[in-house]
Amino acid sequence: MDKASLSVIIPMYNEAENVAPLVEGLKRALEGWHGFLEIIFVDDGSTDGTLEALKRAQECEPRIRIARFGTNQGQTAALAVGFRLARGSVVVTLDGDLQNDPAEIPRLVELLDGCDVVCGVRLRRQDSWWKRVSSRIANAFRNWATGDNIIDTGCTLKAYRREYLEGLELYRGMHRFLPTLLKMRGARVIQVPVSHRPRLHGRTKYGTWDRLWKGLADVWAVRWMKKNHIDTRATLELIESPAELRRTTS
């Protein structure tokens, strides 16, 4: 994907201290990018000055675009808005807390030469032992229920061919099931190890118990969707009458 046009989407919620170092990291990682590039920050109703920090960064980096919710809507909503705004043929998503390394972006985009979605798998996660264990259990349960094999559903660092995101309807919490939903659309998905860094500023916005019960309901919803999905790609054949063929080719 040497000359791909690229949209980088970053949800932000109360990450004011992380804006400047994140933008600098993105500029270093993408300074050799020769095609179209845009960086879309989605401010998810922040109350700590994140929006002001993003506007300051935009003054120095015109490729930054900012979307903002008036109230907190959640990560799925922020990603969905980013997907709708994205103009690049390739879309990369990452968190705004500096734990994802922007330097990984060119490698993930390059890997799209052989697939449609690249999912990061965090190595040596820099999180509490409780968060690591609970995530491992949740991932195993999701895969068991949906019949999938996604190792790290919570890793936001992913690369996509944009055509697989077009028209995708998402609901709250569905961002954790994106690889599964895109496989249902015929996407070829691979998983690759990525680095993970400790959080330096702010704190995590998503508690384990807050998302547990909602996550259980989401699993069964996706299980139902997968079981009842209608796939016309392999079976559909359209046979026109000779008269219709003559009309359309005349």
Image (cartoon, helix red, strand yellow):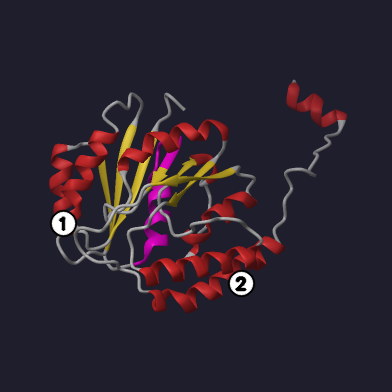
Tag of residue 35: none
Magenta stretch in the rendered image? 73-91
With 120 as the anchor, is 149 left or right in this view? right
Measuring from the top left, give residue 124's x and y in whole percent. 38, 54
User: Vertical placement of 147 versus 137: above or below?
Assistant: above
Which residue is under mark 1?
Answer: 17
With 169 as the anchor, is 67 left or right in this view? left
Asked whether 83 falls inside the magenta stretch, the response is yes
Question: What amino acid type should be assigned to the residue bearing mark 2?
Answer: Trp
The residue positioned 46% from the left and 31% from the top of the image is: 110
Which residue is farthest top?
Answer: 250
The residue positioned 53% from the left and 56% from the top of the image is: 151
User: Vertical placement of 29 versus 219: above or below?
Assistant: above
Which residue is under mark 2?
Answer: 220
Determine if residue 63 is in view.
Answer: no
Measuring from the top left, give residue 199's x and y in whole percent. 25, 58
Quarter of the picture containing the C terminus is top right
Which residue is farthest right?
Answer: 242
